[in-house]
Every structure is written in C-alpha cells, then in structure tokens.
C-alpha cells in the first residue's frame, strides 16, 4: 500500500518523464529563437493563445534571454520597464503585461531593422586605477572580434607585454602635441598627474560610420569629455568587488613604486565617487562575466 501523499512508483516514473519532456520542449523553443528559426513574437502569441503549450510554460526571462544580445543587464532593464516578474510565464501574463510585451518585441524588431544588431553603438568603459579595465578590454579583444576596441595614444612607456598599436600607441610628448593641434583626438587628459592619454578620433568615426560596435577604454576625465562631444555614447563604470580587492590588485601588479601606488589610490577614491555619472555599473569580480556584461551594452 502506498503511503498517503506519495505517488506509486509507476506514476512517479511517468511524472519524471513528463517533466523531462517539458524541459526539453522549452530548451528547443529557446534554441529556435536564438538561431532565428522562430521569432520571440511568434513564441509569445502561441503561448498566449494556447495555455497548454510549451510556449505558455516558458518564463518571460527565458524568452528574452533567448534573443541575441540579451543578458543579465538588458534583462533586468527590460523586466523593470515591462513591470513583469522574472518568474512570470507567458501563459500567466495579465492583459496589460501582454500588451507591453507585444509592443516591446515589436519595437525591438523595428529598432534593429529586422537584423540581430543595431547599426552601431559607442560604449565608453572607465573606472578607477587597477580595477582591471585593460584586462576586461583584452578579453573582449581576444574573444569578441565583432566589437572594435579603440586604441588610445599615451605618452607613458609600455609595460611588460604591451604592444605598440595593439594596446596603445606609445608616442612622444612632441607627437602628442601635434595630434592635439591637428584635432586628431576625440579626448585627451593628464592621468595621475603624470602622463597624457588620448583617443584618436578618425578610427572611431570610421568604425561607427561602417556600422560597427566600438568600445573605448579610457579614464574618468576622458569619459566626461566624450559625453560632451558624443552624448549618444553609453558610459559604463567598472567597479572592483571591494576597496580591499582594489588595493590588492594595485600593489600586486608591482608596476609602480610605493609613492606612485599611494597617489593612485588617492585618485581612485575620487574616481569611485563619480560612478553615479555613468549609465551603467559593472562589477569586475570575474573577468569573463564582466566582459560579457560590457559587450551586452554595445548592442542596442
């Protein structure tokens, strides 16, 4: 005799197989949207019209993250805009939520012009010293070739492993003066009361004109300057997991003497206080995760 509240073994097995089938069906749906075999709008309509379908059981967050370019950052922003819980399933949407989600997906297609990406976008990545901007940018350079990294010019000397023309254009003070006078820099600034850094403008303008996604890795002053001349740019502030971790990273890399380390830490305190000026904040706890969050923001 089966104890009250427990399923017979045969029923338990059937329930398990049914659950696996449901998961497989949802996985197939997400794959179909991801590859373009089906549209998110089509999945939504089936889910709304047939409450017993696999589409109806799909969560809104699962549908949205199946769309190319959607990740944690964009998902959170979209669900807040739509006023929909991350746990909500398509079949359980209220009347107002259905309308908002339909309009959202329609607007997304219109915005992208029927393609998976908008024509172009400029993202500016900044943050305090030693937060790992270069490491995150290097990961994107190596793994996301669709995103073009702007190469900055600087008057400082190369660090071990840095390559001229790849990581920076290492120029003399005389050459930097010439670039300023010729209007060849999108922005430039003196960093840490020491060296000058600047963004050559012609390559950025050319890439955006070609419809490419462009990422600038620059300092706080440079980000502010870009916002003035290109207000459409998206500003992203890279944060350390904690102040203690920032100190550990700065001292651990061993590229500055004690006096320079202290000067940079004081500058970092000022830089951290400016994070509210930025459109988004990304915590660099894991390089890959931080890089992918930044990449998400290069997609409209």
Image (cartoon, helix red, strand yellow):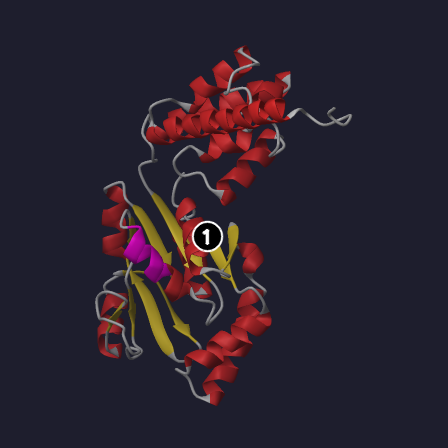
Magenta span: predominant SS is helix
Residue 228 seen by the camera: no
Residue 143 shown in magenta: yes
Outermost residue toward the top in this view: 49
Residue 186 placement (x, y as % from top left) = 32, 58
Q: Residue at x 56, y 40 (%)?
A: 76
**Closest to the observer, 118 or 22:** 22
Residue 252 placement (x, y as % from top left) = 46, 80
Please indicate whether residue 266 sits to the left or right of residue 143 in the image: right
Outermost residue toward the front in this view: 1
Residue 279 shown in magenta: no
Please indicate whether residue 140 sits to the left or right of residue 71 in the image: left
**Closest to the observer, 171 or 25:** 25
Q: Which residue is drawn at 29% across and 78% down?
A: 160
* Quadrant assignment for the N terminus: top right
Please indicate whether residue 77 sits to the left or right of residue 4 in the image: left
| Magenta-drawn segment | 137-144
Q: On the image, numbered disc 1 is attached to which residue?
A: 235
Q: How crowded is mark 1: few (under 14 residues within 10 Å), some or many (20 or more)?
A: many
Question: Is 205 situated above or below 78?
Answer: below
* Quadrant assignment for the C terminus: top left
Element type at mark 1: strand
**Closest to the observer, 293 or 127:** 293
Question: Is 281 situated above or below 87?
Answer: below
Q: In which quarter of the image is residue 66?
A: top left
Residue 191 seen by the camera: yes
């Amino acid at each position: 005799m089966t104890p009250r509240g427990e399923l017979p073994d045969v029923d338990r097995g059937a329930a398990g197989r049914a659950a696996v089938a449901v998961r497989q069906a949802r996985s197939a749906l997400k794959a179909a949207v991801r590859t373009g075999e089906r549209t998110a709008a089509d999945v939504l309509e089936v889910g709304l019209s047939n409450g017993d379908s696999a589409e109806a059981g799909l969560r809104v967050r699962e549908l949205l993250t199946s769309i190319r370019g959607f990740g944690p950052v964009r998902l959170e922003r979209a669900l807040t805009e739509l006023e929909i819980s991350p746990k909500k399933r398509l079949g359980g949407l209220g009347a107002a939520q259905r309308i908002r989600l339909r309009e959202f997906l329609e607007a997304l297609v219109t915005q992208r012009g029927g393609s998976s990406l908008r024509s172009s976008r400029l993202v500016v990545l900044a943050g305090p010293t030693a937060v790992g901007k270069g490491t995150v940018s290097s990961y994107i350079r190596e793994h996301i070739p669709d995103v073009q990294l702007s190469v900055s010019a600087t008057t400082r000397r190369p660090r071990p492993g840095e390559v001229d023309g790849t990581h920076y254009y290492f120029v003399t003070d005389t050459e930097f003066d010439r670039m300023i006078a010729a209007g060849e820099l999108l922005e430039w600034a003196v960093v840490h009361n020491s060296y000058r850094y600047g963004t050559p403008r012609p390559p950025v303008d050319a890439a955006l004109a070609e419809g490419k996604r462009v990422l600038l890795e620059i300092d706080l002053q440079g980000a502010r300057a870009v916002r003035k001349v290109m207000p459409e740019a998206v500003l992203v502030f890279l944060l350390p997991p904690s102040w203690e971790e920032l100190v550990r990273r700065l001292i651990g890399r061993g590229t500055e003497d004690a006096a320079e380390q202290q000067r940079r830490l004081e500058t970092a305190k000022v830089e951290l206080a400016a994070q509210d000026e930025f459109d988004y904040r990304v915590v660099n706890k894991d390089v890959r995760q931080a890089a992918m969050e930044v990449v998400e923001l290069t997609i409209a």
